[in-house]
């Protein structure tokens, strides 16, 4: 990194810290300066930043964005998009800068309640908003509603404020919608992609086209009830589509023909719903809003198919006759990333992001990219990783009663050892079946919080955090997004190497054609999971690895994060 005594951008960086109400800590000043140099002195338009837990990625991203806009922003150009995977993460990020004028969080319209249309019993949200049409109407009653409610509406405020906000915080999905469908936002100086290792999966899920027997049945009921469609040809089309999925008649040779027909169908429904909606604007606002929302829904579904045909991105087709479901899903963002670019600079950040991963999957020009890996900030002895190599686990071996006994005995022995020391911890399992298997034995010995199938993890985590005695939290859903500081968790048990399931066709496609990438994604998940219980320089925890494949993949040359842990190989006694 750059010598602290020769930081030519030091003053703008310090000015931004002051503006944000923060002070640089540790190596942040030098780290941020090095990133700024990559853009302004080394001519890079994209920086991939691997920043370990404790480096303060939120602050680094915000300061880099603010400094770059101060030094490079053009007239009429806003500062930044700062992107997270979910609204929850975006809210946490926004709370970091609560009260700072230049930062604004924006969500999709379905997150804002409409007071003009809502009742105590039936809330209505801004995805049914009709303010624009009401303002254009000459009806006195509508003008009165606009005057009473719309001026105080949070959604209306956000719609205006988002075009003036220097730094806009939102989630990936909102950003994808804006860049692919609406293009509502002005050009920005920089886009900050936090948790950038999830960009491809987030894009794949957002753009996926799902068609199923259940969904087509719901569509038939929905349009028949709400749109008064009597054309038997419409329902014949839906019925045939369902039958052809179930009979496995749709394959690589004809699926685009089916999707083209579905695209036309969705567009027709969208037009009918919007036309009907306008006829109720003056007489029935509730019905107007309901039909407008319905039109938007079918318009969005049409857009996903339209994107596939327009951009022709690399994708998989998966037809599941047994489940009566058809899925078309992107493999990587690839060349479509250029459709998403809305700024001259891009900053990709994560504790587990790889330069080759993003360069290859986003189709970036390596000459425009600089990869920066910050050194560990936590003492490695506080992040102990113990490989026990109980056995090598795979789908078949884990059905063996002898292997199951080894897993259960190891979890019980390790948990009891820490519980006896007054320490709580977590067990990361590969599935709910394994969670149940271990829990049945474990609950006899310790205070247990078991994540059960069909329930949400968050409420269980809150109960675990509030427990006043040593306890164990067990779940298959704790590899990311969970923070268990200090005494909340002093040990972690990884049961099985977290390979993504090859039963999913997109994953199998990646594993077959990009084996190194498949392996790298597994390593990233291990690093993410191992970071749940050490959240500060003083914090510490021990992570136990049971699966022999875990130690095997840990030694891979692709693992750039080995230096963040103190590793040992032991036998469980």
Image (spheres, helix red, strand yellow):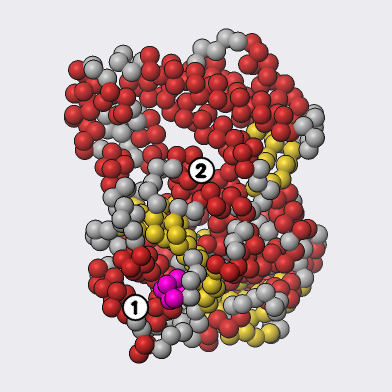
The part of the image, by quadrant, that contains residue 483 is: bottom left
Q: Who's the residue at 32% across and 80% down the image?
A: 10
Q: Who's the residue at 51% across and 12% down the image?
A: 228
Mark 1 neighbour density, 10 Å: few (under 14) some (14–19) many (20 or more): some
Is residue 40 within the magenta segment? yes
The reply, left or right, for residue 30 in relation to residue 572 is left
Quadrant in which the C terminus appears: bottom right
The part of the image, by quadrant, that contains residue 463 is: bottom left
Between residues 258 and 180, which one lies in front from this camera angle?
A: 180
Give the CA distance from mark 1 to mark 2.
Answer: 35 Å
Task: Give the residue number, with chain letter if any, for mark 2.
Answer: 180
Task: Give the residue number, with chain letter if any, for mark 1.
Answer: 9
Question: Residue 376: x percent and y percent?
Answer: 50, 82
Q: Of the residues under marks 1 and 2, which one precedes in the sequence?
A: 1
Q: Who's the residue at 25% across and 38% down the image?
A: 153
Mark 1 near mark 2, Cβ–Cβ under 8 Å? no
Circle 1: element type: loop
Magenta segment boundaries in residue numbering: 36-41
Task: Tell me if I can see residue 482 in this picture.
Answer: no
Between residues 381 and 52, which one lies in front from this camera angle?
A: 52
Q: Who's the residue at 58% across and 47% down the image?
A: 205
Circle 2: element type: helix
Between residues 378 and 496, which one lies in front from this camera angle?
A: 378
Is residue 493 within the magenta segment? no
């Amino acid at each position: 990194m750059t010598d602290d005594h020769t930081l030519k951008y030091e003053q703008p960086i310090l000015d931004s810290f002051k503006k944000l109400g923060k002070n640089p800590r540790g190596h942040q000043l030098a780290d941020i300066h090095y990133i700024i140099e990559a853009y302004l002195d080394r001519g890079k338009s994209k920086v991939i930043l691997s920043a370990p837990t404790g480096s303060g990625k939120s602050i680094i991203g915000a300061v880099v964005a603010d400094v770059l806009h101060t030094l490079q922003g053009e007239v009429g150009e806003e500062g930044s998009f700062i992107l997270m995977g979910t609204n929850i993460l975006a809210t946490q990020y926004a709370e970091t800068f609560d009260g700072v004028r230049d930062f604004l969080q924006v969500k999709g319209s379905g997150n804002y309640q409409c007071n003009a249309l809502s009742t105590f019993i039936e809330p209505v949200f801004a995805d049914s908003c009709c303010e624009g049409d009401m303002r254009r109407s000459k009806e006195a009653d509508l003008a009165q509603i606009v005057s009473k409610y719309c001026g105080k509406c949070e959604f209306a405020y956000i719609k205006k404020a988002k075009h003036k906000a220097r730094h806009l915080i939102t989630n990936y999905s909102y950003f994808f919608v804006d860049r692919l469908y609406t293009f509502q936002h002005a050009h920005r100086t920089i886009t900050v992609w936090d948790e950038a290792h999830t960009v491809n999966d987030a894009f794949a899920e957002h753009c996926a086209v799902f068609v199923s027997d259940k969904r087509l049945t719901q569509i038939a009921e929905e349009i028949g009830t709400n749109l008064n469609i009597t054309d038997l040809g419409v329902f014949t089309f839906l019925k045939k589509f369902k039958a052809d999925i179930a009979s496995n008649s749709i394959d690589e040779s004809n699926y685009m023909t089916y999707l083209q027909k579905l695209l036309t169908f969705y567009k027709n429904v969208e037009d009918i719903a919007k036309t009907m909606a306008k006829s109720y604007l003056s007489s029935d606002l509730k019905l107007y809003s309901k039909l407008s929302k319905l039109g938007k829904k079918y318009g969005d579904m049409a857009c996903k198919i339209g994107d596939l045909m327009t951009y022709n991105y690399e994708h998989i087709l998966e037809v599941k006759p047994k489940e009566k479901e058809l899925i078309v899903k992107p493999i990587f963002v690839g060349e479509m990333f250029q459709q998403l670019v809305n700024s001259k600079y891009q900053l990709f950040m994560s504790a587990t992001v790889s330069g080759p991963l993003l360069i290859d999957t986003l189709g970036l020009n390596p000459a425009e990219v600089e990869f920066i890996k910050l050194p560990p900030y936590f003492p490695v002895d506080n992040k102990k990783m113990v490989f026990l190599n109980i056995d090598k686990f795979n789908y078949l071996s884990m059905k063996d009663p002898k292997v199951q006994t080894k897993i259960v005995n190891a979890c019980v022995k390790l948990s009891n050892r820490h519980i006896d020391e007054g320490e709580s911890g977590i067990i990361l399992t590969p599935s709910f079946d394994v969670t149940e298997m271990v829990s049945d034995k474990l609950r006899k010995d310790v205070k247990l919080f078991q994540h059960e199938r069909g329930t949400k993890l968050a409420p269980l985590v809150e109960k675990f955090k509030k427990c006043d005695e040593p306890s164990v939290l067990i779940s298959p859903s704790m590899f990311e997004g969970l923070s268990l500081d200090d005494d909340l968790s002093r040990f972690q048990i990884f049961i099985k190497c977290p390979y993504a399931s090859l039963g999913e066709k997109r994953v199998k496609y990646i594993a077959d054609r990009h084996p190194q990438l498949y392996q790298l994604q597994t390593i990233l998940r291990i690093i993410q999971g191992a970071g749940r219980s050490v959240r500060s320089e003083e914090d510490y925890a021990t992570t136990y690895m049971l699966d022999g494949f875990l130690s095997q993949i840990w030694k891979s040359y692709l693992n750039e994060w080995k230096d963040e842990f103190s590793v040992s190989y032991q036998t469980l006694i």
